[in-house]
Amino acid sequence: MGDSRQLNVLFASSEVVPFVKTGGLADVAGSLPRALKDAGCNVSVIMPKYSRIPDEYKYNMQHICEFYVPLSWRNVWCGIDKLAYNGVDIYFVDNEGYFKRDGIYGYFDDGERFAFFSKAILECLQYVPELNNIDILHCNDWQTALAPVFLCEFYHGVGNYDNIKTVFTVHNAKFQGQFSNRMLNDVLGLGGIPAAADQLYCDRDSINFMKGALCYADRLTTVSPTYACELQMPFYGEGLDGIFRRRSNVLSGILNGIDTQAWNPSSDSQIAAYYSIYDMSGKAECKRALQEELGLRQDPLRPLVAMVGRLTEQKGIGLVRYAMDYLMSRSVQIAVLGTGDKDLEDSFKYFDWKYGDMMSARITFDSALSHRMYAGADLFLMPSEFEPCGLSQMIAMRYGTLPVVRETGGLKDTVKPYNKYTGEGTGFSFANINGDEMVGALMDACEVFWTDQDAWKKLQYQAMTQDFSWRRAANDYVGLYHSLHPEV
Ligand code: ADP
């Protein structure tokens, strides 16, 4: 260790809570930078200035500067605004042509929009004095994946750019940013650099942004140790497993945390009654209130199984559909909150109708209801086919709602399966993508619920006292950053 100055970190993400959110990446980008600051780094965040950002934030932004971003044969206007939020400076990349739209993703020119964002991140470092001395550029997912590529190809030997080391975090390898190879010349300006073009190609006429970052970044991380191993296998690697294997020496898995203040049953204003490990009586009231709200039979003796999340194949929803009739025959109540694939949504609407006061499906996005479900349920089911980290199972444990999960990715790393001989554990799990195995794990859990209240209470206690705060993750990232700058 050298002069022990603070490391200057720029954290780049296409979505950040509370400004804009479509998935777990926004939660991470909203919490991790603050935790990194508490761990001793000087952190700023950069994201696009979407028109969807609530006005209360937009009105308070300060205009910092403007410049032109070179994109192949064009120079594109870019403004930089700034807002201090929760003790961290957030920089917003402004260009109305790209970001003044109703939604966030899903446009014909998404490739160009986020290539621009990635280039603007690098350009602004020379125009914003506070960002002149960045040590670590931490990029996340495909939307910022070109920044490490551009840094290497266009900024070598320029100003302070050679000091910058890059970290790239994969939050979900399924979404890679694949676009026509015509972008190479037209937008990225990399057509004349065959070595770069070669690394971006994924088939004859497409390029893949994430592949670029996997080849160029100094360090690769993903959001759980198990997912870091799984990515190197064909089943989980989404076609990139060969690169993950080749770069396994710089790949690591760092588990996400959750916002332990927002998710806290002893102070959560959205739930029916407060409770904590010292007095769990409020949880029974939460269950009763949830059963009433969802039109379920108010019976404390029936295990109430909740699911909150996207209704997609990734989440193993097909297994639940397969097992529904059997579970309903075993006096289990099931409550689902989620949106997603139309045919899965329709199935659950049908089950809601068919099973009356034993099954409830709310096909909507409702944050307040999700709090009441985490608090009111006995069990939380998450049989994912793959799960890079998963936040819901950690939230459930914090509310003493025991997770039943498939042993994959972050689920495997966060849920300790119940050991009936020692009483150890924080939930229940099964290994294979198999509906009968899932039912087996769920019925094992119900058996404990029905027959051994002492064991159940012990499991709840163990689940609720796990440390899921961001502090642990932040320390791991800071260690990684320092390994790239041993002189600091
Ligand atoms: P993902 O793969 O979607 O990122 P995570 O488990 O990492 O899954 O995070 C999902 C987050 O979104 C959790 O905080 C969960 O409570 C929330 N969530 C998902 N679907 C809904 C919904 N329909 N209503 C309310 N909250 C939801």
Image (tube, rainbow, N blue to C red):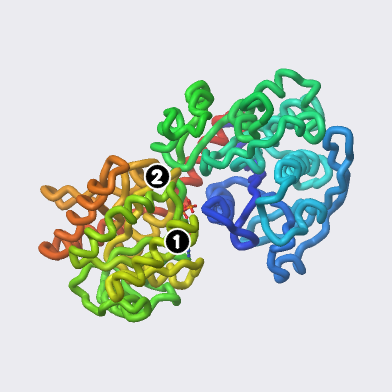
Judging depth in this view, the residue of 117 and 182 nearest the camera is 182
Callout 1: helix, strand or loop?
helix
Picture quadrant of residue 236 = top left
Numbered badge on residue 100: none
Q: Could you say where residue 99 lies in the image, as x and y percent from the top left?
A: 76, 54
Residue type (three-letter) at the residue carrying disc 2: Gly
Q: Could you say where residue 208 lies in the image, as x and y percent from the top left?
A: 64, 32
Q: Is residue 125 left or right of residue 206?
A: right
Mark in front: 1 vs 2: 1
Residue at image point 23% right, 55% down = 442
Residue at image point 24% right, 64% down = 328
> Dot 1: few (<14), some (14–19), or many (≥20) neighbours within 10 Å?
many
Residue at image point 27% right, 55% down = 323
> Dot 2: few (<14), some (14–19), or many (≥20) neighbours within 10 Å?
many
Residue at image point 73% right, 31% down = 151
**The residue positioned farthest toward the top in the image shown:** 195
Instruction: Write down the residue under mark 1.
Output: 345
Judging depth in this view, the residue of 110 and 283 nearest the camera is 110
Q: Is residue 215 depicted above or below 432 in this figure? A: above
